[in-house]
Image: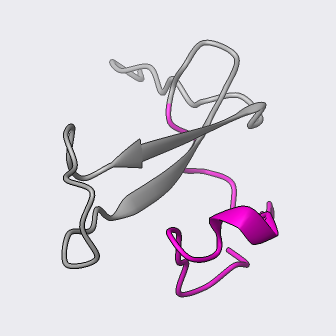
């Protein structure tokens, strides 16, 4: 008899981008790391999806202030 229930997230429908700092100074020496997380419709982190891929596209006017090491994840 199984005495526990596995509750798994649903398919991803939302992308959350969070920064490592809440407040930033306007300086070339300051930076914040961004992390991207897939969420389901209830806000649960989707850790069971290994097939979804995202591509980041930066507008030209932001390329001097935003840098991504890998635009495909």
Q: Which residues are magenta?
A: 45-73
Residue displayed at 69% across by 79% down: 71
Name the residue rendered at 24%, 53% in the picture: 20
Q: Is residue 9 above or below residue 55?
A: above
Task: Return the x and y of residue 26 as percentages of the image width and height.
Answer: 27, 57
Residue for point 69% across, 54% down: 49
Quadrant of the image containing the C terminus: bottom right
Q: Quadrant of the N terminus?
A: top left
In the picture, measured across the screen, residue 22 lies left or right of residue 51, that is left
**Prevalent SS, magenta region:** loop
* Left or right of residue 39: residue 18: left
15 sits left or right of 27 in the view:
right
Q: Where in the figure is residue 5, as x and y percent of width and height?
A: 44, 19
Q: Is residue 56 magenta?
A: yes
- In the displayed structure, 62 sits above or below 9; it is below
Asked whether 61 or 19 is in front, the reply is 61
Picture coordinates of residue 18 (x, y %)? Answer: 40, 43
Foreground pick, 11 / 59: 59
């Amino acid at each position: 008899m199984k005495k526990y229930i596995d509750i798994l997230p649903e398919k991803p429908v939302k992308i959350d981008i969070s920064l490592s700092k809440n407040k930033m100074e306007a300086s070339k020496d300051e930076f914040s790391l961004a992390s991207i997380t897939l969420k389901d419709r209830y806000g649960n982190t989707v850790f069971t999806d290994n097939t979804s891929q995202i591509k980041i596209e930066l507008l030209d006017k932001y390329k001097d202030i935003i840098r991504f090491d890998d635009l495909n994840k």
